[in-house]
Image (tube, grey):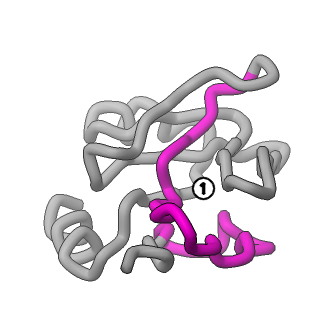
């Protein structure tokens, strides 16, 4: 897993998101992931994006120190994925964020 994380970090990804079975929560948390029943991501200026898959959990691991977890609307939320300098527009949110192996920082200039 460390090799995959390094490869994605070098490729410019800022976080990894994985969907997993409930019983694998301890495996992912032991490897530094946060395991949540619902994926919640703050994507400014669009707002809060959430994804809930019954029977699954979402493992999230920041690959960049600017990625943090906050609480929004009672959900643990990933923030800092979009780094949008003043005067620029962020890209539109990905409609199927959980199908990606990670979230790439596309708005850096």
Residue 79 is covered by the magenta coloring: yes
How would you rate the neighbour count of disc 1 (Cα within 10 Å): few for under 14, some for 14-19, many for 20 or more? many
The answer to whether residue 109 is above or below residue 66 is below
Q: Which residues are magenta?
A: 75-103
Q: Position of residue 53 (x, y in %)?
A: 81, 50
Residue of label 1: 19
Q: Quadrant of residue 6?
A: bottom left
Which residue is pictured at 58% across the width and 51% down the height?
20
Q: Position of residue 59 (x, y in %)?
A: 50, 45
Which residue is pictured at 43% across the width and 59% down the height?
16
The answer to whether residue 45 is above or below residue 92 is above
Instruction: Quarter of the image for the N terminus: give it.
Output: bottom left
| Helix, strand or loop for the magenta stretch, by majority | loop
Which one is in front, 58 or 10? Answer: 10
Instruction: Quarter of the image for the C terminus: give it.
Output: bottom left
Which one is in front, 51 or 49? Answer: 49
Q: Secondary structure at mark 1?
A: strand
The answer to whether residue 11 is above or below residue 37 is below
Q: How many marks?
A: 1
The outermost residue toward the front is: 87
Residue 84 is covered by the magenta coloring: yes
């Amino acid at each position: 897993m460390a090799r995959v994380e390094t490869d994605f970090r070098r490729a410019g990804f800022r976080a990894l998101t994985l969907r997993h079975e409930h019983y694998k929560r301890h495996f992912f948390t032991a490897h530094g992931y946060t395991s949540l029943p619902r994926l919640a991501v703050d994507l400014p200026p669009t707002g809060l994006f959430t994804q809930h898959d019954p029977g699954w959990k979402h493992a999230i691991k920041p690959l960049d120190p600017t990625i943090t977890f906050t609480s929004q609307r009672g959900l643990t939320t990933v923030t800092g994925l979009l780094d949008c300098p003043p005067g620029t527009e962020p890209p539109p949110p990905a409609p199927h964020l959980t199908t990606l192996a990670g979230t790439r920082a596309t708005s850096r200039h």
